[in-house]
Amino acid sequence: MGTVTTDTAAAGRARVAVTLFFLVSGFGFSTWASRIPTIQQQLGLSEAALGSVLLALPAGLMLTLPVTGLLLQRFSSRQVMLVGAVLYNVALALLGFAEHTWQLVLLLFCFGSSRNLLNISVNAQSVGVQALYPRAIIARFHGVWSVAGFAAAAVGAGLVALGVAPGGHFLGVALLLTVLALAFYPGTLPLQPAAGTAARPGFVWPDRELVKFGLMAFTSMACEGTMYDWSAIYFAKAAGVPVGTVGFAVYMVAMTTGRFLGDALTNRFGVPTLLRGSGLLMSGGLLLAALVPRPLVAALGFALVGLGVACVVPLVFSMAGRSARLSGGPAIAAVSTVGYFGFLIVPPLVGFVAEAASLRWAFGLMATLGLALYALVSRLPRPEPTAAPAKPEPTPLVLE
């Protein structure tokens, strides 16, 4: 293997290419999320039953983390990312044709597994691209993810109004996203695992420092997972809005705004201050929606939650990607081991609490997560720098 110095044009191509893979991830996931109420109705699932079914997706995420860690120690993150994107879109297409609950559970497991391959590797790529720029840009990648999610939510709402079945909807989106992934793959970074990582086990449990980052990611991912799975249902049943996807769209707009502002805010105020504010916004928004479930007030609450979660995962993954112990991909996978428990545990619990009490109670209890984030950030030993390097010199990359 040799090295090559990345020039400005190559850095720009890599930035665009990785941006498009974030778009593929965000649009595909929100396409599924936008049709959850429709699929719930088609299969006749109660809130508790839906909560149990939705457990399959984060279970797929969690159980494939060791596989992802192993692959990222053996292959370039760009190769893992492409395979993950193709499998992700195949699973999305098939989800629309599930006719039985067991089929939905199986496909959601596959959807979560492939999403894990795609997301961990694309975040590793984003850390590599960030190293080529003098100022923070990493939150903007996640901003594009949010833009794609909002666009998918809008498309989903429109197709629901037109009476289009999820099968045709999902198939069309999956084909388009696969074409985009194949088209932009050549521009991604040919990063290889750091020397010596191939001899390590495929799965590495995070050390004490990475566990802290993982717990911070847990709080955000738990809120994100709840909003993806339950925001439309909350708006329809608790706030009384006929088109529940409006609530999901409000959340996505706020998250998008927060992520595009995130790099500037990080450079000005620093990571700890931004993360503490994020925790307060998450708690305040969830409490507001739970206490006053009227359309406008609930929408304001969802907007605050979106602003709160906007930059947590990008900043945490960026810090993890600079770990001295592991290279970017395996470090992010290790942090995700803790963080993804938020997706795994919390959204299904929302369904169980909603069945036993109400969705309002479930959302109110979720507000404790923002306070937990605030407390965790306060325990950081020192302010963390942004992901940007001190000088804009080109970074040598290991060729495949």
Image (cartoon, rainbow, N blue to C red):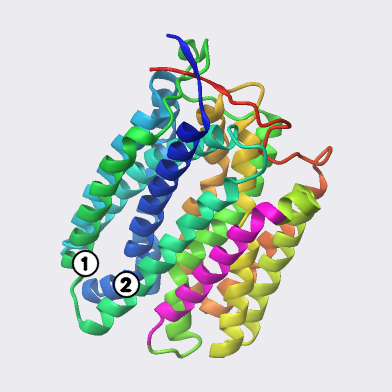
Q: CA distance from mark 2 to mark 1?
A: 9 Å
Instruction: Residue under label 2, please give it.
Output: 155
Tag 2 secondary structure = helix
Amino acid carrying mark 1 in the image: His
The segment highlighted magenta reads 243-264
Q: Residue at x 46, y 90 (%)?
A: 240
**x and y, in percent, of residue 335 in the image:** 58, 37
Q: Residue at x 39, y 25 (%)?
A: 71
Residue 355 seen anywhere in this rendered image of the structure: no
**x and y, in percent, of residue 354 in the image:** 49, 74
Tag 1 secondary structure = helix
Instruction: Residue under label 1, please give it.
Output: 169
**Residue 256 colored in magenta in the image:** yes
**Front-most of 141 and 153?**
141
* Quadrant where the image shows the C terminus: top left
**Front-most of 216 and 126?**
126
Amino acid carrying mark 2 in the image: Val
Q: Are marks 2 and 1 in contact (CB under 8 Å)?
A: yes
Q: Residue at x 62, y 77 (%)?
A: 301
